[in-house]
Amino acid sequence: MAFGYLASKEACSVSLRDESSWSLPPGCEEIKWRNFGADISLEGVNEWKIQEIGYDGVEKYIKPPTFSDNVGKLARQVDWKKLIGSDALYDNPNSIKSENEEVENVEKKPVEFEERVVPEAGPWHGVAKYLHESLQQFNVLLDNLAIMRATDYMKPLTILDPIHAESAPMQSENAAASKATQWVWKRKALLEAMSVLELAQRLRNVEVEDEVHQQKSQFFMELTKMREYWRVRKTGDHIYGDLGYRIFGSKYNPRELFDITRISLPPGTSIDVTVPRDLTRRSTLSVSIVKDDYTNRDLFASLDDHQFEYMKIDDSKIESIHWSDALKWAQETLICKDIFNTLCSDAVQMRNRLSTIRDGVLLVSLYNDYLLRVELKYHPFREGDLPEEGCSYLNRSLREMMVAQECTRWVRPQTFVSLPLTNLSEALDARGPRAFTGREIESRAHKPQFLLEKLITVASHYSLVEMARKTLEEFMTTTRDPQVRVFNVAV
């Protein structure tokens, strides 16, 4: 419905409910109606309230209450207890007393009983009482057995009891029934005994299976732990591992394999390892710098019985060693032997150095009267700390050089088979029209250096530094000038 008006004096209210009853109130005669204005939509204000607007623009509304909801809401606001009263019993009709019902309260006195006191004859009265009852029961049992034994008609018939021909047919029927009953009883007794034995055997098998399953689970857990540090392989029913430490090259060398077996009765571990016999010993590799003097008799190892104690191998003691310690010691022996063999091979190939090898000792000339001494010493295969011999710095340097040499990849696969193998990057090969020839690539490639040459270089520098340090210390002890001390610290 559209309407418009223009008021000159004041706003006037007009009833819009009934169009026939439209009339202007007094004082509004000067209003002039005109046909202009806006369309107004008249509708109820009871709209649904918005509860939530989602991220995708969907609006969730709250459903308006119905007539029942409004009535319930208003009913909950009424104080019914105040209107009805606190003494009203309309909620529980059973609690309303009838007029004809009379309640009689009769007080009943509890009946008191006197407890009988059994006289006691001392602290052992209870024991004597139970013994007396046991004796009575035993006497009754003896009387029953005596009656059954002395009375003929109470004795049970057996299978071997003969049946007399002159006996009555009733007696033969009773005997047959008695034999059949005995057979049934014996059969039931045997069945019960068999069920008990089967249950015991089943429980025993369950215990054995649980123990076997526990041993298997422990074995596989330890085998998984072993595979974290060692290479393990299974061929058929045989499980073996590799003691090798090389990153590049072939694996599972036959002389570096150890066998893995499972122990049936594990004391603390379920894995038993068998290392090669030549590795069942502990080894140390010591590097030192000695002076070549005629009075020095410690250049080579002594050949006493104590040096060959490692050759006495006791299998029972070796089996008692935990597999982690046994594998670690065996690999340490393998590493020491490989390092010593590499140094000996390098000493033979080096022509500018004099060297001597005897009884596990390698002597190489450094300069003047000083020699580089490398000794490989074996110890028994048992627990304990090994003595540290030689120079700790040179021992550590030798291990670091060995690790660096093993971790270095000396060759790189070429794209073309005709090109020589090199360790340089592909950018230095000058691919394309300006490519190098195979001879030029080989000449530019880095050639590996002997391990003994690296050790001699480090040992010579270390020896010179030690000699300079000792000389400066001796000079400082004899000279009192403080400038020398400051200069020495600066160096």
Image (cartoon, rainbow, N blue to C red):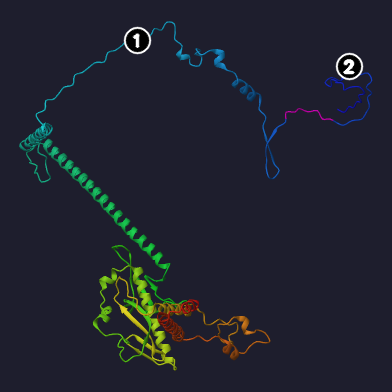
Relative to 114, residue 206 above or below? below
Q: How far is mark 1 from mark 2, CA to CA?
A: 84 Å
Q: Are marks 1 and 2 in contact (CB under 8 Å)?
A: no
The quarter of the rendered structure image containing the N terminus is top right
Residue 321 horizontal/vertical position (percent): 30, 69
The crowd level at tag 1 (other Cα within 10 Å; few <14, some 14-19, many 20+) is few
Residue 357 is drawn in which quadrant? bottom left
Residue at (36, 63) in percent of width and height: 219
Give the residues drawn in magenta, as a range: 40-46
Which of these two is toward me, 177 or 452? 452
Q: Amino acid at mark 1?
A: Asn
The location of residue 315, given as percent across then percent down, is 26, 73
Quadrant of the rendered structure where residue 61 is? top right
Left or right of 85 in this view: 321: left
465 within the magenta span: no
Q: Which mark is residue 25?
A: 2
Give the residue furthest to the top.
100
Three-letter amino acid code at the position of disc 2: Pro
Foreground label between 1 and 2 = 2
The circle drawn on residue 105 is 1
Q: Could you say where residue 252 lies in the image, as x and y percent from the top left?
A: 41, 77
Residue 64 seen in the current view: yes
- Would residue 412 appear left or right of 10 to someone viewing this image? left
Q: Residue at horizontal 27%, vertical 79%?
A: 311
